[in-house]
Image (cartoon, grey):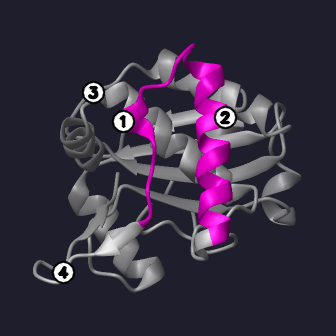
Amino acid sequence: MKGTARRGGGRPLKGSEHALRRSHRIEIGDTHAPLKVARPRLRRTVMTILKSLGRPRHGVSLALVGDRTIRGLNHRYLGKSLATDVLAFSMEGLPSLSASLPAPLLGEVIVSVETAKRQAREHGHSLHEELDLLITHGLLHLVGYDDEDPLEARLMHEREMAILGRIYARPSPSLRVGPVRQSQHSGNEERQA
């Protein structure tokens, strides 16, 4: 996936800490997201992923945003002036947050719904399937998976498919994530199928 943050990088979106205090374990916000998505479905998806990762009692903040917002966050925290599909910021073990929350805080996953919609259309599956893939990818980053190295990326993508197999009886073959490549002409990153 393109533009995912590594463990420990950056800060959550404003208000996430307070929202997690008020909620159970999963907070879903749609900060300037141009498309509406079913929050109960996303909450079930996140819970399934957390169980698959052995972290069923951890809290997660999921922010659904537009391309403009994620581009700004990508620039601010990773120094890349590009829109991306998902960013992940680990907050696990931060003592100032952990003591005041009802559950240990794993971190925040930020997804561009606009990019997810485009990628779903390009790869021939639904927006919900793409969101599930991106959320899975972000949560894997929060527990230490990395996709910088080709071998680690392959292991991460295999784990994504195993987790998606718990969400779908038969995950769409188009959900298979390939390595990221840099387009020589446009400067945009693209996924290879």
Residue named by callout 1: 174
Residue 173 appears at what percent x and percent y?
42, 32
Residue 66, image x, y percentages: 25, 50
- Determine which residue is flagged by label 4: 187
Magenta residues, as a range? 151-179
Question: Callout 4: helix, strand or loop?
Answer: loop
**Amino acid carrying mark 1 in the image:** Ser
Q: How far apart are marks 3 and 1 (CA)?
A: 23 Å
Point out residue 49 in the picture as x, y percentages from the top left corner: 68, 33
* Alpha carbon separation for disc pair 4 and 3: 29 Å
In this view, 73 is above or below 45: below
Crowd rating for badge 2 (residues with CA inside 10 Å; few <14, some 14–19, many 20+): few
Foreground mark, 4 or 3? 4
- First in residue order: circle 1 vs circle 4: 1
Seen from the viewer's position, the closer of residues 9 and 101 is 9
Q: Which residue lies under the disc numbered 2?
A: 162
- If you read the primary sequence from the N terminus, does the residue marked by circle 3 or circle 1 appear first? 3
